Amino acid sequence: MVDALQEAHRILVERGVFVDARPDSRVQARVRARTARGRVIGTIGSQRPTKTDDQMSDKAVREVLRRRLFRSRRRGRLWHAIPFEDVSELNDYLRDHLRFSKRVSWLAPRARRTAPLFVERAVRFEILEKPPRV
Amino acid sequence: MSGTANAGRLLPGGLGYLRPPAEIELGAYGLDLRGLRVADIGAGEGRLALGAARDATSVLAVDPDRGALARGRTEARRQGLSNVRFREGAAQSLRLPDASFDVVIFSWTL
């Protein structure tokens, strides 16, 4: 991963901008009922290998910052909502998903899992800058 | 550095997509791409690259998946975007010249 970041640094001009954006496995996804802003009725965690991979990525970014290949300009998080017709469609989606846990941790009884459902997922990003040579 | 700008913001235009639409994701970054040369590394089918090409001078989309690149080229033609190129490659060994881009994007790549 550090190799990839070094390549990004190499092809950038001085003061060029590097963007690292990834799903945020530190934050559970939320399952909302009826609308993208509806009641949260469940949460979805990340698989353990995903968390480990993300920690490795974080470590790589910290490493290039430590080596002053880049400096951080800004970081943020945004939320992305994915619609599902019903619980069955959501379960099918999770069954094959490489990052999410295979099951929803439901916070509401079955009767309140009203379709459509929306999975609201965190995406975090960091804007880095290649500093000029001194 | 401003901490967590945009924290808690729900993407209004994200519905119907497994990933955020390019204009939403690029908008969150707060970058003005006009006049800039952009490299989208791990571009897949060019979701972000095609979005960036609307403003940037040129965009290079790099991905190891030839099929995804082919679909991206087709979509670029369909959208009439002539300033985006697709190239096979891996993030760890980019066969690109030094200091040749103003912006490099790794979205879902690291």
Image (cartoon, coloured by chain):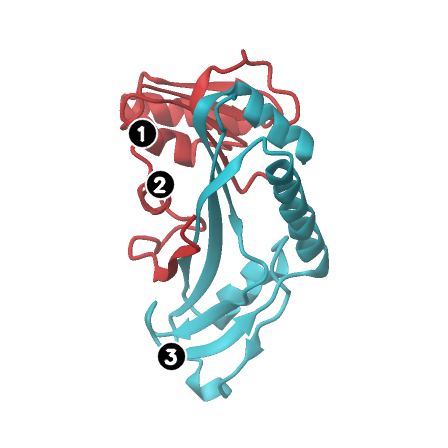
Chain colours: A cyan, B red
User: How many neighbours does mark 1 have within 10 angstroms: few (below 14), some (14-19), or many (20 or more)?
Assistant: some
Residue at point 32%, 42% (across, down): B30
| Furthest-front residue in this view | A134
Q: Are marks 3 and 2 in contact (CB under 8 Å)?
A: no
Amino acid marked by disc 3: Arg
Q: Are marks 3 and 2 on the same chain?
A: no
Relative placement, left or right, of A21 versus B95 is left
Quadrant housing the N terminus of chain A: top right
Label 1 residue SS: loop
Dividing the picture into quadrants, the one containing residue A62 is top right
Q: Residues within 10 Å of mark 3 (few under 14, many from 20)?
A: some
Residue at position x 38%, y 79% in the image:
A39
* Contact check, label 2 and label 1, Cβ < 8 Å: yes
Between the residue at mark 1 and the residue at mark 3, the CA separation in whole angstroms equals 37 Å
Crowd rating for badge 2 (residues with CA inside 10 Å; few <14, some 14–19, many 20+): some
Secondary structure of residue under mark 2: helix
Rendered location of residue B18, percent (x, y)? 45, 51
Of badges 1 and 3, nearer the viewer stands 1
Q: In the visual, does B92 lie left or right of B70?
A: right
Name the residue tied to disc 3. A39
Q: Is residue A90 above or below residue A42?
A: above
Whole-angstrom CA distance, mark 2 to mark 1, is 9 Å
Residue labelled with disc 1: B33
Label number found at residue B26: 2
